[in-house]
Image (cartoon, rainbow, N blue to C red):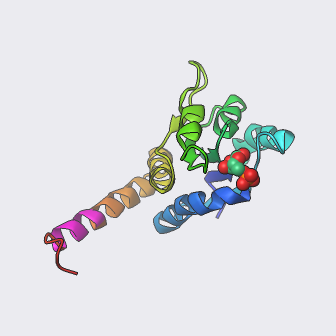
Amino acid sequence: MRPLVGVIMGSRSDWETLKHAAETLDELGLPYEVRVVSAHRTPDLMAEYAKTAEERGLLVIIAGAGGAAHLPGMTAAHTPLPVLGVPVESQALKGLDSLLSIVQMPAGVPVGTLAIGKAGAVNAALLAASIVGLRHPEYLERVRAYRRQRTEAVLAQPDPREA
Ligand code: RP5
């Protein structure tokens, strides 16, 4: 199936984090593509990717990066599609640098910023499904089912001492 979500990251080293977005999209059955697209190592590729995303049928872009994480913002500068930014946990500053780089976009070019690390990657995928679900309602249904499963798991094991 043609991808509806683009998952991009600044480096192969970001895959450890962004793979959680991919796994969640797999679980939701939402078609996506994955690419390493670096804002500073491959700036032309980044611009080309963002500029052509809409005509290629993508509805949402999930962009993960760490450190001086300009990939989500620069991607958003080249496309009107929603861009969801995932701050990758950096070694030096534990991802606080990534978070602040992504979240503090000046007014006019938004990036929907998620939590640092795995939680952000998973939630980016869920949010992407909710956005895509506005056009293709079956994905809203899958988000509902995903949440229902987790509700049932909590209710099935209310005592934390039991395995
Ligand atoms: C950023 O620099 C990437 O998003 C990555 O999180 C970080 C480190 O990249 P590598 O040096 O591991 O390639 O551009």
Residue lying at the far bottom of the rendered structure: 163
Tag count in the figure?
0
Q: Nearer the viewer, residue 22 or 65?
A: 65
Rendered residue at 49%/63% (across/down): 24
Q: Is residue 153 left or right of residue 141?
A: left
Magenta stretch: dominant SS? Answer: helix
Q: Is residue 138 left or right of residue 26?
A: left
Residue 10, given in percent of the width and then of the height, sits at 71, 48
Rendered residue at 69%/29% (across/down): 77
Q: Quadrant of the C terminus?
A: bottom left
Residue 142, given in percent of the width and then of the height, sits at 39, 61
Q: Quadrant of the N terminus?
A: bottom right
Residue lying at the far left of the rendered structure: 159
| Viewer can see residue 134 | yes
Residue 35, given in percent of the width and then of the height, sits at 73, 56
Residue 73, given in percent of the width and then of the height, sits at 65, 33
Residue 31 on the magenta span: no
Rendered residue at 57%/42% (across/down): 85
Rendered residue at 60%/48% (across/down): 90
Q: Is residue 156 left or right of residue 13?
A: left
Q: Nearer the viewer, residue 154 or 96?
A: 96
Image position of 57 with respect to 162: above or below: above
Provide the residue span drawn in magenta: 150-156
| Viewer can see residue 10 | no
Image position of 159 with respect to 2: above or below: below
Residue 153 on the magenta span: yes
Q: Is residue 91 left or right of residue 142?
A: right
Residue lying at the far top of the rendered structure: 107
Q: Nearer the viewer, residue 133 or 101?
A: 101
Image position of 38 with respect to 81: above or below: below
